Every structure is written in structure tokens, then in C-alpha cells.
Amino acid sequence: MNDIDIRDLINSYKEIGTSTIGHLTEKGYLPDIKALNSCTATIVGRVLTVQLTSDNTDVINQALIQAAPNDVLCIDAQILGVKACWGALRTCAAIYEKLSAVIVIGQATDSLQIQQLGFPVFAQGISAVTTFKSDHIQGTLASDIAYRFGEQTTMIRSGDIAMMDNDACLYCLLMSRSSYYQIAKKSTKKMR
């Protein structure tokens, strides 16, 4: 699928809600990822992944620089436990870089400031404990993320599509995203 098709598909997905996709499949649903502030629209974008391997979060700064406008940055911060790797300053950088949203598989901080900025951040939770400058091994950019929740495992890859709203955070696989949209569009027409 070329870039033009992907952009058209992203714009098409903005017309439907995550619950419409949820009527069709559980695949790609990230059940414990919640919006830090209310979403008034469906947010859709191409995913750029970051996987942290220690408390060195410098790779997030690289991702912010390398991300294209309208991308969704997805950070695997599970290794950090209760420490947050995302806060108000990085949110300002995401706004400057014109990202669509950020997903943190882990903790975020500065929730009030993020809400005031109005930028869509989705995370597993909120923590006052944060990372600090570290010389440990740096994480990796554009690597596959294995998101696990209970018995469910979802592989999240750079280049695929993320779709988010107040109800859910969904990750749409490259091979199935077009077919999900076609089925969802048909079921939406039937409901009218």
C-alpha cells in the first residue's frame, strides 16, 4: 500500500468510532490504555514505535525529531514500572512536531498540564515518579512492541495505524486495516 492510500485510509477512519471496529473484532484493542483528557473526535495516525530497555529515555527525543506530522508515537515503557517517561515538556515537543497523539504503554506524569495543553495522550496510568538522566542502555526506535494484557498479545509495529477516542485505543494491523474500514463503513450505513 503506498503513502497516498495510507493517508486516504487514515482520513476515512476518522469518520468512524473505535466502538464500530470493536463490534467487528477484539484484535488490536489495548484495554488498559486510557485517554488522559477527553477526545472530541476520533484520532488516527501512522504509528512510530519506541521501546525502552532501561530508564534511559533519550530515544524518545530521537523519535520526536524523526516522527512525521500526524504520526502517533507509541512508547513501550513497561520496563519502567511505576516511573513515568512522558510529561508536559515532551507533550509540548509533540505539539511542536505536529504529532496526532502519543500512546504510552506505561505511566505518564503532569496530567493536569497535559489536559491544559489539550494534546491527546493515552497511557496505562499516571505517576508522580519520573525518569531522570541515565547512562544505561538506550532503547530502540521503530522496533516491534509486544503488548500483553492477560492472555492477549498484540504486536505493534511502526508504519501501521492507531485509532483512538474516548472509548478505546486500537491498533490496526497493516494487512487488515483496509478490510476493517470497509466492514465498519457498511455496518455504519446499515445503522442509519
Image: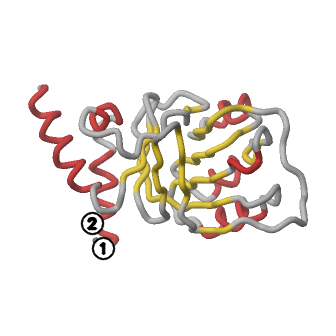
Q: Position of residue 29 (x, y in %)?
A: 42, 40
Q: Residues within 10 Å of mark 1 (few under 14, many from 20)?
A: few
Distance CA(mark 2)–CA(mark 1): 5 Å
* Left or right: 140 as drawn, with respect to 1: right
The residue identified by callout 2 is: 5
Q: Measured along the vertical axis of the image, is residue 47 above or below residue 19?
A: below
**Foreground pick, 115 / 54:** 54
Secondary structure state at the residue bearing disc 2: helix
User: On residue 42, which mark appears?
Assistant: none
Q: Position of residue 25 (x, y in %)?
A: 29, 40
Q: Residues within 10 Å of mark 2 (few under 14, many from 20)?
A: few
> Considering the image in quadrants, where does the N terminus appear?
bottom left
* Left or right: 187 as drawn, with respect to 70: left
- Res 59 → quadrant: bottom right
The residue identified by callout 1 is: 2
What's the amino acid at mark 2?
Asp
Q: Measured along the vertical axis of the image, is residue 110 above or below residue 175?
A: above
